[in-house]
Amino acid sequence: MTKYTILFICLILCSACSINKNQPVNDYMIQYVLNDTVNDSFYNNKVRDSFIWIGQNKLSKKDALKALNNTSHYNKNNGKWDLKFNQTALYNEKAWKKLVNNNINDTLNDYWNSNNFSFKNRVFSKQEIDSVRKLADYSLREKVYFFTDVMYYDKDIAVFRLEEVTNQFNGGLFKDRILFMKKENGKWIVIDEGIINRN
């Protein structure tokens, strides 16, 4: 077996491991973004581009954990987003402390690349995203998604931060949330989300 063949096999295996590690992110984007676009008024109920735009810089897990203390969760009793994370059924003090201890010191500046995802994507560098002119070459209406790496809470619950932005008009759309997902029938599904309050 030639060294090029071995190198090729290693690249394929690394790519598969990368996708598997971030499977909750992949499942979320495929189920809740790609498959939901037809009903998205942001796109005037038309099918979105055939690929998803991803911000290259990974969001900080440390910042995500700090933000989780300032999130609003849905309250089934009154239909409002008025619960704090520590008031939800998911909250477990021991699991929370373990989540923090395992991730709070993660301050590495890391990057996404196209091979991290199982859907069609276009990864934008910070310089490209900061340039309105560059984005205008594609579409001012297209959303760009930013993520943290996946963290695990209480063993089987995947947690990650998701920011959704666009340069539309003079400030654009901005959504910032922490997602909690659990694997059911081979797919990761959202079981809770916390909307980050930015005021």
Image (spheres, grey):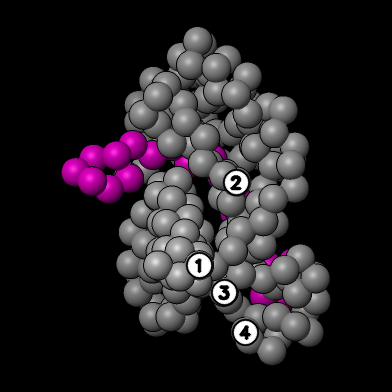
Mark 2 vs mark 4, foreground winner is: 2
4 or 3: tag closer to the N-terminus: 3
Q: Amino acid at mark 3?
A: Arg
Mark 4 vs mark 1, foreground winner is: 1
Give the answer, above or below, for where 90 lies relative to 25.
above
Percent position of residue 42, x then y: 50, 72
Q: Residues within 10 Å of mark 1 (few under 14, many from 20)?
A: few
Give the answer, above or below, for where 130 lies relative to 57.
below
Residue located beneath label 3 in the image: 122
Q: CA distance from mark 1 to mark 2?
A: 35 Å
Q: Residues within 10 Å of mark 4 (few under 14, many from 20)?
A: some
Residue located beneath label 2 in the image: 148
The secondary structure type at the circle numbered 3 is: strand
Q: Within the magenta stretch, is there residue 174?
A: yes
The answer to which image quadrant residue 67 occupies is top right
User: Contact, CB < 8 Å: mark 1 with mark 2?
Assistant: no
Q: Amino acid at mark 1?
A: Lys
The secondary structure type at the circle numbered 4 is: loop
4 or 1: tag closer to the N-terminus: 1
